[in-house]
Image (tube, rainbow, N blue to C red):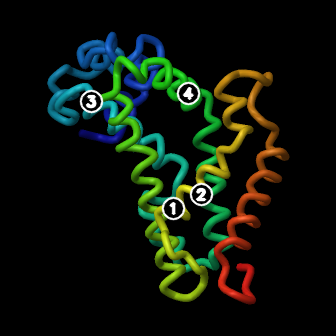
Amino acid sequence: MDLAKREAILEAAGRLFLEHGFERTTMDTVAAAAGVSKLTVYNHYHDKEGLFRALIAHKCQEYFDGKDFEHLGTLPPKQALTRVASGFLGLIYQGDVLSLYRLLIGGASEHASQNRAFYDSGPRPTIEALARLLAGFHARGQLRVGDPQRAAEHLLAMLQGCMHQRALLNVEPGPPRASALKEHLEDVVAVFMRAYAPSGAQD
C-alpha cells in the first residue's frame, strides 16, 4: 500500500473513531471515508482492532524520533531526556489525543479490549523504549537507574502531572501556554536528573 493511501486510511480512522466511537465505527465506513476499497483496508489491517492499534502507533511516531529511541543513546542523558519529554508533551496535548483519552476513559468499563489495544500500541511501547534508553545510560555509568521500567514510568508520570489532568477535565480554557509547558518540561527533567544522576554528576 502506498504512503498516500495509508495516510488517508489512518486519517479517516482517527476522525471516525472520535466522532462515532470504537463500536460504531466500521472498516467499511473507514474505507469509504478514505476513498479506498474495503479490500485494501482489510488486507493491511485485518480487523478494526488492528486498524486502531496502527492508528495509535502512527500517532506516537509523529512525535517521537523513532519508537526505540536508540539514536538518543548517543546524546548526553539530559539532552536525550529533554527531547523525549518534548515529544511526549507535544503528543499528549494534541486536541485529538485529548479527545481520544476522554473517549477511552468514558468507555473503560464497557470496552476494556479497545483500551488494552490503546495501551499496548501507545503507552506501553513508549515506556519500554524509554526504559531501554535509561538502561543504556545506566550501563555506561551516565545515570544510576536500578529499575529502568520504574524510572521510565516516573518520568512520564511527572510530565503528565496535574496540568494534563486539568486539560483532560477541561477545567481551563484551551491548552497550556508554550511557555508553561517549557517551564514544566525543564523542571521535570531537572528533578529526574537529580534523582537518578550518579554521585557528583547532574547531566
In what element is the residue under mark 2?
helix
Q: Are marks 3 and 2 in contact (CB under 8 Å)?
A: no
* Amino acid type, mark 2: His
Residue 154 marker: 2
Residue 96 marker: 4
Q: CA distance from mark 1 to mark 4?
A: 28 Å
Indicate which label's residue lies in the foreground, 3 or 2.
2
Q: CA distance from mark 3 to mark 2?
A: 29 Å
* Amino acid type, mark 3: Glu
In what element is the residue under mark 4?
helix
Q: Are marks 3 and 1 in contact (CB under 8 Å)?
A: no
Q: Are marks 2 and 1 in contact (CB under 8 Å)?
A: yes
Which of the two discs, 4 and 3, labels the residue nearer the N terminus? 3
Which residue is the site of mark 1? Answer: 150
Q: Residue at x 28, y 40 (%)?
A: 2
Indicate which label's residue lies in the foreground, 3 or 1.
1
Residue 79, image x, y percentages:
67, 71
Which of the two discs, 1 and 4, labels the residue nearer the N terminus? 4
Image quadrant where residue 84 sits: bottom right
Image quadrant where residue 171 sits: top right
Q: CA distance from mark 2 to mark 1?
A: 6 Å
* Amino acid type, mark 1: Arg
Residue 36 marker: none
* Amino acid type, mark 4: Asp
Which of the two discs, 4 and 2, labels the residue nearer the N terminus? 4
Q: Residue at x 15, y 24 (%)?
A: 39
Which of the two discs, 3 and 2, labels the residue nearer the N terminus? 3
Q: Are marks 4 and 2 in contact (CB under 8 Å)?
A: no
Q: Quick one: 147 or 170, which is closer to the camera? A: 147
Please rate how many residues cluster around mark 3, counting C-alpha atoms within 10 Å: few if below 14, some from 14 to 19, many from 20: some
Which of the two discs, 3 and 1, labels the residue nearer the N terminus? 3
In what element is the residue under mark 1?
helix
